[in-house]
Amino acid sequence: MATLEQPKVRRAARWFDVRHRKLGMWAYALNRISGIGLVVYLYLHLVVLSTLSQGPGAWDAFVSLARQPYFLLLDVILLAGILIHGLNGLRIALTSFDVGVKRQKVLFSALMLVALVALSAAALKIFGG
Amino acid sequence: MENRLTQEMMENPFAEEPKRSSTWYWQIFTGVALVLLLGLHFIANHFIATGGIRDFADVVSYLRNPIVLVLEVLFLIVVATHAMLGVRAIVMDFGISSQAEKRLSQVLTVIGVLTVAYGLWLTWAIIH
Amino acid sequence: MKLLDITLQIYRYKQGEQPHYDTFTVQVEDTAHVIDAIDKVWAEHDHTLTFRRACHHSSCGSCALRINGVEKLPCITRFSEVGDGNIPLRIEPLRNFPIVSDLVVDVSGFFQRMSASDMSITRYAESTLPLSVDNLDEIVQPRAVVLPDNLTHFNRFENCIECGICMSACPTMAVDNKFMGPAGLAAIYCALQKTDDADEKAHLLALVDGEHGIWRCHSAFECTEACPQAVDPAGKIMALRREVTANRFKKVGRS
């Protein structure tokens, strides 16, 4: 029967299609994107850290790079990813044990508010010095 | 008249008990542990460290502290595990064959072990 | 009561051809529902339009489709909910099912999942064998139906009309052919409430305790949001996780 079925890879795009979707779907899409981003960051971080094995010169060169404003901006974006993924992850841990399921949307909003506050405070510290 | 519903149910893959899965528990456990471990790692390296980032000498003395060493190694193992489990979860969503699922777990285990091994080597190289 | 001019952009697919959208305009009463407009397109414009409809009162689950990208039952969707004629209505089939023709999708996989829970509580009225006092035992093997003290979960699933909307809304169903899906998992939770036989309970929990059962759900909760009958499949999946986890600890405790 020649029925219409889309190829799997294109269908995966639906994970991130939040049009007409509710908060839970936003949480899922954000968690998946931040998770992928954090895995990429993990390996970038480990590569950067390898300069430590080459002695002070190589590492300290990186440190001066890390103090540049654009780099600090990347740090803030990283922190946003960490906060979103971590706090939403706690919500998922709770709902997975059937805790807070009925209020999962409110829980998401509250946690993202915490993330925003924490991110703002951190950004102030990072750029304020 | 033959009971066709019974026939279909006998061939129904959804009516067969699948292999029990515990990976989700590990994902939650490592995730919650990371909130603590990553929090500590971040604060120690960027908020306690003067200037927000340690220079070479500071990194060496930091890692030579035995408590720090244990926590950082623990953090490395937990984060590598959580990352591998996360990647696995995404690929499993594609409904791949059982063979492919086994292969996936093997490959990710190897990558995870290599990641931790690299981190341990690097830590040792810095301290000495 | 006034008349509305409703424009519909309907997804068309016939096997062997490329999918495309056809636009039609029909006149309907403002108190009618979206399914009536689709009926009119068939009646007045194009007899090749293929779609499912039956009860017209959200009882049968046949007509489920997407209106402007959102899963709905068109038989109970008023035009006032979807623009009152001011915007064209994009009518598309459910997601995550193979499309047979136009708005009709292949739901065999759906019913395969639903039948995994073996919800064979039979009422005499459902039997198709001729009834007589002599053969009542043959027709029905009654299972002890123990109604729990808290009837809410038990009754909630009775609301399920097997329309498939939750399966369409679920982002995991979009990609994973092995996933049981919100409807199938909710059905198993319901079956769990209806039995107090320990072996049966263990079997039902074992059915969902796999990589492509409850553990493949990623908590998007779209199924619960989209369900027209307030079945709350996501809540049932989380309840199953709790039950499976508690069951494991019991096993550990005993060994």
Image: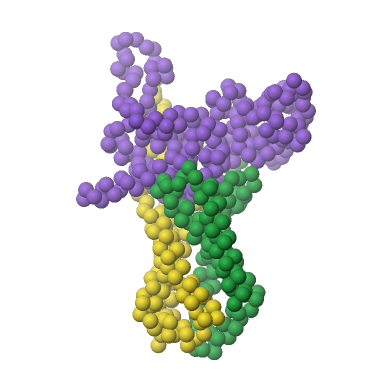
How many marks do you count on the picture?
A: 0
Instruction: Please say whether residue C106 is visible from this viewpoint.
Output: no
Q: Left or right: where does residue C138 sit relative to residue A96?
A: left
Task: Looking at the picture, tell me which residue is in the foreground, A65 or A119.
Answer: A119
Q: Position of residue C228 (x, y in %)?
A: 56, 33
Q: Identify by letter the chain in yellow.
A: B
Q: Position of residue C214 (x, y in %)?
A: 42, 45
Q: Identify by letter the chain in green.
A: A
Quadrant location, the C terminus of chain B: bottom left
Q: Identify by letter the chain in purple.
A: C
Task: Report the coloring of the rendering.
Answer: by chain
Task: Looking at the picture, tell me which residue is in the foreground, C247 or A11.
Answer: C247
Instruction: Please say whether residue A126 is visible from this viewpoint.
Output: yes
Quadrant location, the N terminus of chain B: top left
Q: Left or right: where does residue C166 sit relative to residue B112?
A: right
Going by the picture, which residue comes out furthest to the top?
Answer: C133
Q: Residue at x 43, y 76 (%)?
A: B119
Task: Looking at the picture, tell me which residue is in the foreground, A31 or C39.
Answer: A31
The image quadrant that residue C239 belongs to is top left
| Residue C111 in the image: above or below residue C39 | below
Q: Residue at x 49, y 84 (%)?
A: A52
Q: Left or right: where does residue A11 sit relative to residue B41?
A: right
Q: Residue at x 56, y 69 (%)?
A: A122
Task: Looking at the picture, tell me which residue is in the foreground, C83 or B10.
Answer: C83
Q: Residue at x 75, y 36 (%)?
A: C88
The image quadrant that residue C155 belongs to is top left
The image quadrant that residue C116 belongs to is top left
| Residue B61 in the image: above or below residue C248 | below
Q: Position of residue C174 (x, y in %)?
A: 55, 46
Q: Position of residue B96 (x, y in %)?
A: 48, 52
